[in-house]
Amino acid sequence: MTKKAIITGITGQDGSYLAEFLLEKGYEVHGIKRRASSFNTQRIDHIYQDPHEPNPKLHLHYGDLSDTSNLTRIIQEVQPDEVYNLGAQSHVAVSFESPEYTADVDALGSLRLLEAIRFLGLEKKTRFYQASTSELYGLVQEIPQRETTPFYPRSPYAVAKLYSYWITVNYREAYGMYACNGILFNHESPRRGETFVTRKITRGLANIAQGLEDCLYMGNIDSLRDWGHAKDYVRMQWLMLQQDTPEDFVIATGVQYSVRQFIEWSAAELGVTVEFSGEGVDEVATVKSIEGDNAPALKPGDVVMRIDPQYFRPAEVETLLGDPSNAKNKLGWEPELTVQEMCAEMVQDDLKTAKRHALLKEHGFDLPVSLENG
Ligand code: NDP
Ligand code: GDR
């Protein structure tokens, strides 16, 4: 029997990698996507199948995590073996600006799915994965953070995700559902949203190197994160639903670096050595030397990064470092890609796009480069 999975958030970074992964495993994949005023399926266009073809394996349904009736109807129609709840307003800084919406989608959205599974009598059939997060640890109470580390959320996003964490545990304990939390630390890729810090850096520096932007404006570059590759992490999401008993796992690499280091690596991948000077809001990164021909728009002495306090958060999560030993021991999971390899892949991908734009610009076809930041 072909297994059926529903993925909320299929148009996002993780959803797109997970859909690829499940299709390769022979699943029939049903994705829930939001209606948007412009196309929002760029990350999954390459796996989309014409519904007129016989036996398509990927199906898309319009839906929203704020809409109970529509979630219930999709689950009823599909009768899924597995539900992966990846959909969310996932930007921490934005959650301070839209706290109520974030709570509705990121907290109650999970409840709506769990309740639909239960209401439809699927609690013994349908397995449920909740995209929990290292942001739950917030103001960290223990280093490194593991499954037993107390939570201390520091944003409306993290507080909403805390509700989802516990409602998932609660439905497992109350109704015997196979429901579990993956407590995932930051994971990135060339498909990462442009306003998360890694992608903002790789895309921004590639654009600057090609003369499409002038300078990167950053927030707290002392922040420390445990970054992994999204491809490694979605494999783990699936593995968690294939065990005999449901359990919550921390997924991390066990190594942490600062945002400043990520800027250094990204510049180096472009052949540019940068030097940091100044303190606090006056800190800047200046070009020290350039090798190769990836940065024709730059010369030594150019300032490529400045601090803009608008990117400081009302409450910051300064440091995160995960202990993935439980996942390694019980599930045999090891990340295959290092953060440095991932950074290089992201820079090369953004450089390709920047070069295309620069070439078009040189020939008079000036494509606007979105300068929206986060
Ligand atoms: P993205 O922001 O890339 O993707 C989020 C997805 O959720 C998108 O498909 C988005 O749709 C969809 N979505 C947003 N709002 C709604 C809504 N109201 N109803 C239905 N769908 C909605 O996130 P990631 O792929 O990076 O993360 C996946 C999940 O994992 C998220 O829940 C995130 O909070 C969590 N997480 C992520 C980590 C990371 O480092 N990436 C770490 C730990 C947890 P659209 O494309 O239309 O915007
Ligand atoms: P995070 O990711 O908040 O950890 O949440 P993000 O990449 O946004 O920030 C990481 C750290 O970098 C600092 N930072 C900046 N961040 C952004 N976005 N823009 C900046 O200019 C900037 N300058 C410094 C931040 O302050 C922060 O400390 C991500 C999301 O994917 C969540 O959904 C997920 O749950 C967690 O990772 C784990």
Image (spheres, grey):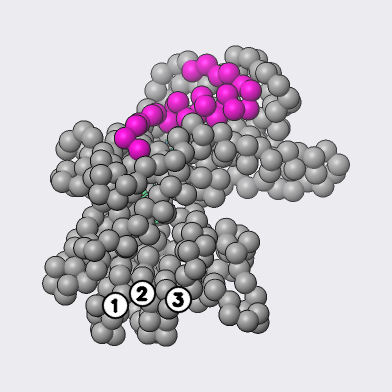
Verify CB contact (< 8 Å) between mark 2 and mark 3: no
Q: Secondary structure at mark 3?
A: loop
Magenta stretch, residue numbers: 253-276
Q: Is residue 128 magenta?
A: no
Image height of 23 relative to 190, above or below: below
* Disc 1 C-beta below 8 A from ligand 1: no
Quarter where residue 122 is shown:
bottom left
Query: On the image, numbered disc 2 is attached to which residue?
Result: 81
Query: On the image, numbered disc 1 is attached to which residue?
Result: 125
Image height of 14 relative to 267, above or below: below
Quarter where residue 322 is shown:
top left
Verify CB contact (< 8 Å) between mark 2 and mark 1: yes
Give the image location of residue 292, x and y in percent.
Answer: 71, 21
Q: Amino acid at mark 1?
A: Lys
How many marks on residues?
Answer: 3
Indicate which label's residue lies in the foreground, 2 or 3: 3
CA separation, marks 2 and 1?
A: 6 Å
Q: Quadrant of the N terminus?
A: bottom left
Q: Nearer the viewer, residue 322 or 224?
A: 322
Q: Sequence-wise, which precedes: disc 1 or disc 3?
A: 3
Residue at point 21% right, 42% down? 146
Q: Amino acid at mark 3?
A: Thr
Instruction: List the single residue furthest toward the right.
Output: 363
Q: Nearer the viewer, residue 351 or 286?
A: 351
Residue at point 85% right, 44% down? 364
Q: Sequence-wise, which precedes: disc 2 or disc 1?
A: 2
Give the image location of residue 28, x and y in percent.
Answer: 48, 73
Question: Tag on residue 58?
Answer: none
Residue at point 50% right, 56% down? 17
Query: On the image, numbered disc 3 is attached to which residue?
Result: 2
